[in-house]
Image: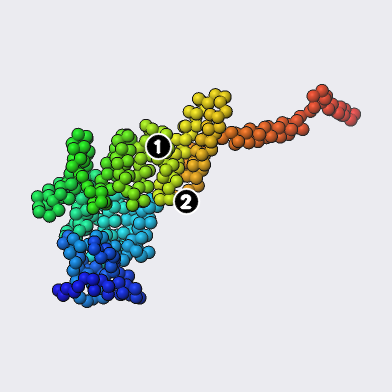
Amino acid sequence: MRTLPLCCLLILAAAASAGDGPALDLVTLKEKGARACYIVAETMDEVRWRISADPGTENKTPRREIKSVQYAFQRSSGAYSQGIEARERGKFAESAELFGQLAAAAREAEQVVGSLEAGASWDLAGNPKEAAAAFAKVVDKFPNHPLALDARYRLGMALAVAKDAAVDAVVKKLDEDAKGAKGAQQASVRAAAIRAVLALNKGDASEMRRQASKASFNPESERASWLHFNLFLADASRAAGQGKEASAIYERMLPQLADDPAAAARVRLGIGLGKVDSDRQGAIVALLALDALPNGSPEQKCEARYHAGRLMVGEYQALMKDAGTDERKLAFADSTIITARLLLQSAAESTAEHASKELAAEFLKTAPLDAAERAKAEEEAKKKAEEEAKKKGAAAPAPGDKPAEKAPEKAPAPK
């Protein structure tokens, strides 16, 4: 294989990408910034690439010189972006199908990324068997790809959630890799994460915590797996009614997500939901923080507004019990219910397709009114009563009036 000076080739690649040909991938080098090229194949050790998508001379760059890779299809409006958009709208099965279309392409990068993302969407859809099948495609066909390790981890997690005995083989392979010279730590961490789920399945909380403590993913270099495992732990704790524990996990994650608004929104929502049953005011603060920020999907906003609104109704009721005749307290309570109803109304009118939309609409029907709305409702009720009374008065005789006498019946004519 012919090797040319990397800087010269990447300059040519950048020029090629500016033309009318197919969009090129972007490779960010640790020392020389982002450059355009067409990635042919990848391993843990190197990246093989060309200066254009057309057949031609292949070159290779050591993986250690590369900071990140962004494929051309990740910047287009095709199946990849459509799959991401569908997932953000909560359409997880639809998202998985779109990523499956990407995975059906001939190119290695599309097969790998498409299968990984399809598996992630099936996982969110609550279908661990389909998720495992998608992750297995990467593990089986591209075992040396740099994303194969994450695919094996996600495969093991999906099988563990599905309580599929095939998970044992995945853990065994990770244990073998943990004894090797390369990637040993990463393999060991992933094996521990899967074992934490297996312990959770058995109801062994002590062993689950022990294995979870060993699953120390690096939040910078292993962002995807770190995010997935910590979200899994937090969500599992919340599902088990351990809201405080769940919120603590979410809160530990948040400082690492300053450069990831989408993930931060997901975590902020988790913090709020984790505090719903134990810390009403803390939950309201967390949920309103998500509502105020520009990031977050319509579904996340809808859920946050519904829960914040109903919790603020609870706050209003508590404030009214304590207010008595104190005008300041009554005014504060009134502002609280105004905000609560606005949040519930916003959730009920959301464009999102989420269960919280209907829940907000139903809750709003019985939610208390603010002082102005109560006065308006009372005035309308009074007018309605007066109108009804007038209608009845017009139909009934006035007091003191004698009922009209009937005319005497005529006697029958004589025969």
Say what amino acid the circle numbered 2 marks.
Thr
Give 101 or 234, whichever is nearer the viewer: 234
Query: Which residue sits at x=27%, y=44%?
Result: 230
Q: Is residue 347 above or below residue 332?
A: below
Mark 1 vs 2, N-terminal side: 1
Q: Is residue 83 above or below residue 230?
A: below
Q: How is the image coloured?
A: rainbow
User: Disc 1 versus disc 2: distance between alpha carbons?
Assistant: 24 Å
Residue 188, percent from left and from top: 15, 47
Which residue has dot 2 on it?
351
Point out the image quarter for the N terminus. bottom left
Q: Is residue 303 above or below residue 224?
A: above
Say what amino acid the circle numbered 1 marks.
Ala
Q: Is residue 379 above or below residue 164?
A: above
Which residue has dot 1 on it?
283
- Can residue 155 be spotted in the picture? no
Point out the image quarter for the C terminus. top right
Q: Secondary structure at mark 1?
A: helix
